[in-house]
Amino acid sequence: MALKLEQKKTIVASVAEMANRSSSLIVVKNNGLPVSDMTRLRAKAREVDVYLRVARNTLVERALKGSPFECMNESLVGPVLLVFGGDELSAGARLIQEFSKTNDKLVVKSLSLGGKLLDAKQLALVASLPTRSEAIAKLLAVMQAPIAKFVQTLAAPTSKFVRTLAAVRDQKQ
């Protein structure tokens, strides 16, 4: 079906907006994914704040022009699915990796993080990155460890003295 000029402009504008708001982009080759599976994938994507888009490659190339993901234009060959990650850098990669375990119709062609083109083999590495909340929790644990160890060291002589007195009391009874 031929698209009218206004429809094309709308598609380009929506893809460009998502490209400018996203932290990552994954281009996935769609080898005949059934509609039911695509519906499940879209539902999972909504849950994790990931935006999926299927559009004509020429329109996507225009939309990505001037965005951090302009390096992805070489990957736009054949039927592809665009996976824009939201605030979480690795959410899209985790979604595609989980979905492709049960469905071999999706093949990752390339991915980009912050304008840097990565090989498709690095999807597992990107998917293993912690989420923002996990990274903050790990950072706080690392920051808290020296303080906790210091307090423990300060309390050690007193607690050892109390344990010694309790042992002497138990021995005399």
Image (cartoon, helix red, strand yellow):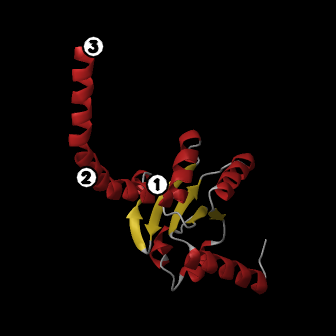
Residue at image coords 58%, 63%: 83
Which amino acid does the dot numbered 2 rest on? Answer: Phe
Element marked by disc 2 = helix
At which x and y percent is residue 34?
A: 70, 48
Residue at image coords 54%, 67%: 77
Residue nearest the viewer, comparing 139 with 52 = 139
The label nearer to you, 1 versus 3, is 3
Q: Which mark is residue 86?
A: none
Element marked by disc 1 = helix
Q: Quadrant of the N terminus?
A: bottom right
- Distance from label 2 to label 3 (Cα)? 35 Å
Q: Earlier in the sequence, mark 2 or mark 1?
A: 1
- For label 3, the crowd category at 10 Å Cα-Cα, with few meaning under 14, some 14 to 19 and many 20 or more, is few
Which amino acid does the dot numbered 3 rest on? Answer: Gln
Q: Earlier in the sequence, mark 2 or mark 3?
A: 2
Residue at image coords 69%, 55%: 42
Residue 70 to residue 90: above or below? below
Q: Quadrant of residue 122?
A: bottom left
Residue nearest the viewer, comparing 163 with 110 = 163
At which x and y percent is residue 109?
A: 48, 59
- For label 2, the crowd category at 10 Å Cα-Cα, with few meaning under 14, some 14 to 19 and many 20 or more, is few
Residue nearest the viewer, comparing 57 with 69 = 69
**Which residue in the protein does label 3 denote?**
173
**Which residue in the protein does label 2 denote?**
150
